[in-house]
Amino acid sequence: MTARAIDLALIGGSGLYAFEGLEVEEKLRPSTPFGEISGEIALGRCAGRRVAFLARHGAGHTIAPHRINYRANLHALHALGVRRAVAVNAVGGITPLMKPRAVCVPHQLIDYTHGRLSSYCDVDGAEVRHIDFSEPYTPALAHALIEAAGRAGIQVVPRGVYGATQGPRLETVAEIARLARDGCDLVGMTGMPEAALARELDLEYACVALVANWAAGCDERGVGQTLPPISLDEIFEHLKVATATVPRIVTELLNGHLRS
């Protein structure tokens, strides 16, 4: 693959399989030393800037969270010239601010996943890198997202701790209570190892978390409530509304306010 100047990569999560506002110029599905990527990478322009878009779960949401080839996805974007990425993740809300349809730019995460290929060091002959992961999201890029949302008139929660679970099942009430005790505000299934792999590649990386539902046993009163089963129809409706904010935030980010 030939590296080219790309100002931003957008990695779409559940409900975001194409980027509205991207004038697509070409689509690529490059091979990588780590196997197949999730789908075609769309390259084009938005707000006069070069942008790459990749749907994490594939175009038809055919890849479960624990089966996504995160290493291949990040490697392909990096090889194309991406040095800055915004991840969009559908999540459940745990704490009261994280109600359905809320948009959060998290600042921390806790990894509860297991068995995923989580490092480029996991191959024979690779250099073992002990990356500093104290701040899993690039603060400057996260701050730029928060400011872009403000200019777009979209309210965001500017901090939050993302708990990354294995999936694809949703969590139990007891598991969510544990995450709450650990300090998690959000729960999702795709936050790791993507963030760590981005750090290994020295990519600037930040997350826009879209709250699709209250996590199990949670509502505005707190954790451990007795509630009806989570409705998938409601999840999709909430996610549709929250997802509609993403093009406005990203366009504002690109529209003369993202440093080259």
Image (cartoon, rainbow, N blue to C red):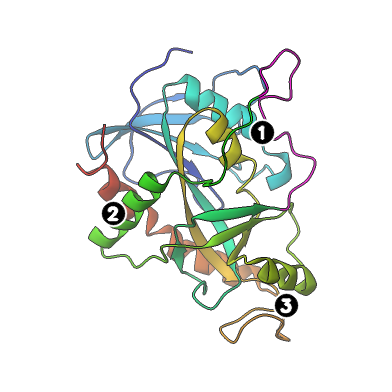
Q: Nearer the viewer, residue 226 or 181?
A: 181
Q: Which residue is mark 2?
A: 148
Q: Secondary structure at mark 1?
A: loop
Callout 3: 10 Å neighbours few (<14), some, many (20+)?
Answer: few
Type of amino acid under label 1:
Asn
Mark 2 neighbour density, 10 Å: few (under 14) some (14–19) many (20 or more): many
Give how far across and how far down residue 148 sits, in percent: 28, 54
Tell me where residue 193 appears, x and y as whole percent.
64, 41
Q: CA distance from mark 1 to mark 2?
A: 30 Å
SS for tag 3? Answer: loop
What is the distance, in whole Å, between disc 3 and disc 1 at their CAs? Answer: 31 Å
Q: Is residue 72 visible?
A: yes
Q: Quadrant of residue 83?
A: top left
Q: Start and end of the magenta stretch?
A: 112-128
Residue identified by numbered label 3: 229
In front: mark 3 or mark 1?
A: 1
Q: Which residue is mark 1?
A: 69
Label located before the other in sequence (1 or 2): 1
The answer to whether marks 1 and 2 mark residues whose Cβ atoms lie closer than 8 Å is no
| 126 part of magenta stretch | yes
Q: In the figure, residue 10 lies in which quadrant?
A: top left
- Residue name at image x 71 percent, y 55 percent: 165
Position above or below: 24 against 114:
above
From the viewer's perspective, is 123 left or right of 71?
right
Residue at the image point whose x is 60% and y is 34% from the top: 38
Residue 23 x %, y %: 31, 35
Residue type of the residue flagged with mark 3: Pro
The residue lying toward the viewer, choosing from 30 and 87, is 87
